[in-house]
Image (cartoon, coloured by chain):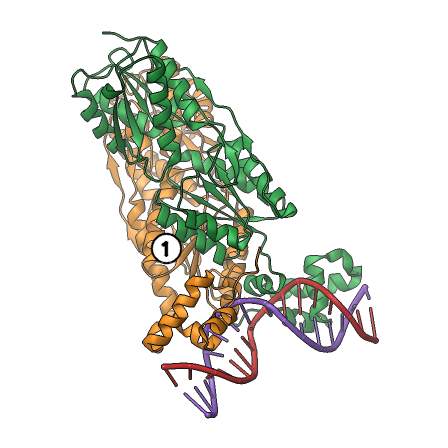
Chain colours: A green, B orange, C purple, D red
Amino acid sequence: MAPLPTLEDVASRAGVSTATVSRCLNSPEKVVDHTREKVMSAVDELGYTPHFGGRALASRTTNTAGAVIPTMDNAIFACALQAFQKELASAGMTLLVASSDYSPSHEFEQICTLVERGADGLLLIGADRPKTSYDYLDKRGIPYVVAWTNHSDQAACCVGFDNRLAAKRMAEHVIAHGHRNIAMISGITEGNDRAAERVHGVRDALADAEINPDAFKVVEVNYSLDAAGRAFDKLITTSPPPTAVVCGNDVLAAGAVTRAKARGLRVPKDISIVGFDDIELASVIEPKLTTVHVPHRRMGVAAAKCLLDMRELERTIPGREFMTEIIERESLGPVNR
Amino acid sequence: MAPLPTLEDVASRAGVSTATVSRCLNSPEKVVDHTREKVMSAVDELGYTPHFGGRALASRTTNTAGAVIPTMDNAIFACALQAFQKELASAGMTLLVASSDYSPSHEFEQICTLVERGADGLLLIGADRPKTSYDYLDKRGIPYVVAWTNHSDQAACCVGFDNRLAAKRMAEHVIAHGHRNIAMISGITEGNDRAAERVHGVRDALADAEINPDAFKVVEVNYSLDAAGRAFDKLITTSPPPTAVVCGNDVLAAGAVTRAKARGLRVPKDISIVGFDDIELASVIEPKLTTVHVPHRRMGVAAAKCLLDMRELERTIPGREFMTEIIERESLGPVNR
DNA sequence: TTGTATGCGTTATCAA
DNA sequence: TTGATAACGCATACAA
């Protein structure tokens, strides 16, 4: 286990100074061809890799962006992140990913970890987090983009969409199919503004349609198929049972559909179920989910661009709002009672 | 944008030396109560966070493990990683994740990135990669665990299962249902030993059953629903069409099932389709997939333990082999022709 | 174009 | 128990 080669090792092997080696690596155009070749071959022979800590310390920058997402377990974040990362990579930046498990306190820890590691900028999901977290970043002048939402209390750069409006439109769509007894399976809204706003949106639509809000049943659960199934059981056994179930995302909708079928219910003949996100799962399950399409890849790209801009300009910039779209498939039908 | 507070800022504010502050943070027991309190409140007031680069430079360690997975887009890696991370966290280590997109050269880049950033150990998926990658790690004495397989050319610590045997058992199971005209939809085997071994395993079973290996059709595709659908189209239009399709993983199987249904085929009455991995998707799709269960969470935990041990012992240790299990659900039926 | 010298924030050694 | 001080590996201002 030989000690790792350092700049100095490379320098002495190539017969130049450490400064020259450093230049070869960081701004090759500032050094003459034949010395560069000498240096580069020394680098190869030694298998030299610059020490990140040393570099970070000396240059006060890391070319690193961080992202804290709620979970790696939902395809929608994976997709957005992939796009985010690609865009960053083309600007020479690396991405560090951490997950918060939908817990604000855990999120704060992850933010700290990423910042300690020298993240030059951060991608955060949703706006609902303790002021502490924002202060922490603002105090350090670390740029961040808040994705998946179109507004925040802070003057943050938001790259996202109007969750409330999107959910309202979907609920209106359900209502237009004749449903008036509508229930909802939502993610846990505590600390999750996207989930909370989707519930609000549905309420908005009910209010507009003059449907008694007290009869609107919402069950909050973790984002898992099983939990959604249990929530469905609970809802379907109330009286009168809902004729349509609006779900906070496609995973919940898939869980509900699976449970409905297991109970011998036909979807959408006996009960309508709609989702949100439009992940792949939505078109694999039978019946295919009627859902809200969210342009996650485009959000990822836009978020990266914003972060890059903010880094260059050294100030916050306005974000970007995306539109969602209802994807009509098979799981929503006319009311049948 | 005030400059970040440093150890020295904290020290002067608390009226102690930087050494004492450092001790407070790293081995609090070595400093007397009342000084520690002074220091800690100075830390809080200043919102001090240690600079990772400085720390890495001085201590020659980062308490960081890295993982390079093929893709974040498959739930199976997400699950394993979650478990891996949790186990590491309980030992005070942080996890850095990168994805290789199933490309060995891209994987090498990611390995370098993680090592440069000071990863104290690495989790890699599969054993099939250029010797360069192994040499790079060995030369630097960085411990790594090779997961998802039970053997490697190098003397690496493998935490995984026998892909070939598992696939063979599944194929035997299919054959036991009377199928003799079996096709396969596989992931790209180039640079992916798990995929390659699963194909081998199926071949093994065919050979044992004295089925003509020349008639065995394999289509290699990217791991996506659409690609699997197209592969299914290709296979089903050969003559004679297969009565069973073995798939390299559940995503491929889901794509095949979806496509089969779209063509008006009943699964498994008209055609049997089996998967591999047992991800959630497998029990959501209709019919539910008969598949091979892989204990990804347990692998994740075991991999973390191995890495931790290797780090402590400063040498490679033997890995651990897991058993897989066939999960009988609905997508495999008796041959019907 | 290249080399010299300094400092980045932290840990660790050694004295006090 | 605490403090002074020397590394750690690299980038960069400045000098040559």
The chain that hosts pointer 1 is: B
Position of A259 relative to A124 (above/below): above
Is residue B238 in view from this perspective? no
Structural crowding at the residue carrying mark 1, measured as other residues with C-alpha within 10 Å and reported as few (<14), some (14–19) or many (≥20): many
Q: Is residue A253 above or below residue B79?
A: above
Helix, strand or loop at mark 1: strand
Tell me the residue at 24%/12% (across/down).
A270
Residue A204, given in percent of the width and then of the height, sits at: 36, 20
Q: Is residue A51 visible?
A: yes
The image quadrant of residue A256 is: top left
Residue at the image position 52 percent from the left and 33 percent from the top: A299
Residue A39 at x, y = what percent?
71, 64
Tell me the residue that label 1 is attached to.
B158
Number of numbered discs on residues = 1
Residue nearest the observer in this picture, B325 or B239: B325
Q: Position of residue A223 (x, y in %)?
A: 31, 35
Indicate left or right for A255 with B130 as reference.
left
Q: Amino acid at mark 1?
A: Cys
Relative to A67, is B322 on the left or the right?
Answer: left
Q: Which quadrant is home to the C terminus of chain A?
A: top left
> Which sits in the foreground, A50 or B215?
A50
Residue A2 percent coordinates (x, y): 52, 72
Placement of B114 over or under B26, stated as above or below? above
Residue at figure coordinates x 23%, y 19% from the top left: A215
| Residue B71 found in image quarter | top left
